[in-house]
Amino acid sequence: MNDLAGKHIVLGLTGGIACYKAAELCRALVKEGATVQVVMTEAAGQFITPVTMQALSNRPVYGSQWDAREPNNMAHINLSREADAILIAPCSADFMSKLLHGAADDLLSLMCLARPIDKVPLLIAPAMNREMWDHPATVRNRAQLVADGCTVLGVGTGDQACGETGDGRMLEPLELLQDVIAFFQPKVLEGQNVLVSAGPTFEAIDPVRGITNRSSGKMGFAIARAAREAGAQVTLVAGPVSLPTPRGVRRIDVQSASNMLAALVEYAQEATIFVATAAVADWRPAQAADQKIKKDGSGQPPTMAFVENTDILATVAQSPRAQSGALYCVGFAAESHDLLAHATAKRARKGVPLLVGNIGPATFGKDDNALLLVDASGARELPHNSKLALARQLVAEIAGRLPAAQH
Ligand code: CTP
């Protein structure tokens, strides 16, 4: 993906051991298509050299407001005017306090103060010892910086370079990359509470065997990520898959269709949008054996009775909240042929306003897909693309269809 193509980011480094992570962050931003201009404070230079950052960003690093390379000698103006965002990573406790007070005694703080505040957003990735992070001064500074329009990214928890353990270390480079990508996505689902089901279910036959299917969960995870990027609060109810949880998403792991039904019915009570991408098993063994079923030597396989699982989507779509328009339900249909006819029929059968069809065997486990959106006014194709790109398009399509009361 090239999620940051065309974006110019000023990456500011301040004094902290997390400067070593800024090198990888710089590389990750560049790989995602951004151009990166590094600006370092004098303290940052104690932890990492400009040589490293120049090599990774492919641009000379700036550190002084008296840099004679700028013809007008106004690096703070020139550098900030070109930026789509200023990202300070790591941002030390001292630099947070400087930003808060509008200090301007070095190039980076001067540039932050001089930036056109409505055009050039400021993001900071704090990094400090846990006592410093929890100190009332830092807590106060953080709140005031947010009030001043600065985006304060989270911090990590765990072992710190000082030997202590707790909150305050800088997020990992790839986490920061996700946050920067998310920052630039349009916030079309701000204020919405999105519930997504994803992956297969697993219906136990006995303690070692079960029935499942080939759903990888990738489409559902991509939708959860896209909804979060669009500003929604997101809960992802996932069957057994080995995918990382998208950043900022609450994940509930389940196994069987019955577990999934219970979780979704519960979380649907607070959701405003439900997207059902899970490939729920249609049937489960009527009785799961407590012990492993052994061959009895007769050469005959055991007989097995099945019962049909509850249709989760139809159940949620018939709930009073969905019927009143407070919960917008979106179904998926994995078909092998006649997509339009099956998706249209399934939309009516499930009682949902929007049904998204795809050809199952063509997409299971893959990173790309093509979607067919069927609603009351007809069908619309979202042509072949990565699942994440399609998820973002689908999120925009859903946002555009929400009843006016939900906007
Ligand atoms: N679904 C569900 N609960 C079930 C079965 C399906 O919530 N027990 C949801 C899926 O998450 C998906 C949609 O219903 O959003 C369609 O799933 P699909 O398996 O394609 O449809 P089925 O109803 O199983 O129809 P068929 O097997 O006849 O194609």
Image: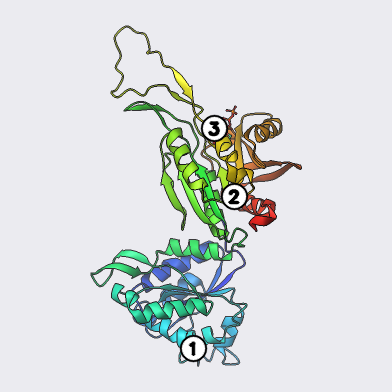
- The kind of residue tagged 2 is Ala
- The kind of residue tagged 3 is Asp
Taking depth in this image into account, of 225 and 400 the one nearest to the observer is 400
- The residue pinned by badge 1 equals 102
Q: Position of residue 175 (x, y in %)?
A: 44, 61
- The kind of residue tagged 1 is Gly
Which comes sooner in the sequence, label 2 or label 3? 3
Taking depth in this image into account, of 332 and 316 the one nearest to the observer is 316
Residue depicted at 59% across the width and 43% down the height:
320
Q: Is mark 3 within 8 Å of ligand 1?
A: yes
Query: Gap between marks 2 and 1, in whole Å?
Result: 40 Å
- The residue pinned by badge 3 equals 311
Image height of 170 relative to 272, above or below? below
Q: Position of residue 124 (x, y in %)?
A: 46, 74
- The residue pinned by badge 2 equals 391
Q: Is residue 362 visible?
A: yes
Residue neighbourhood size for the residue with mark 1, other residues' Cα within 10 Å, grouped as few (<14), some (14–19), many (≥20): some
User: SS at mark 3?
Assistant: loop
User: SS at mark 2?
Assistant: helix
Query: Gap between marks 2 and 3, in whole Å?
Result: 24 Å
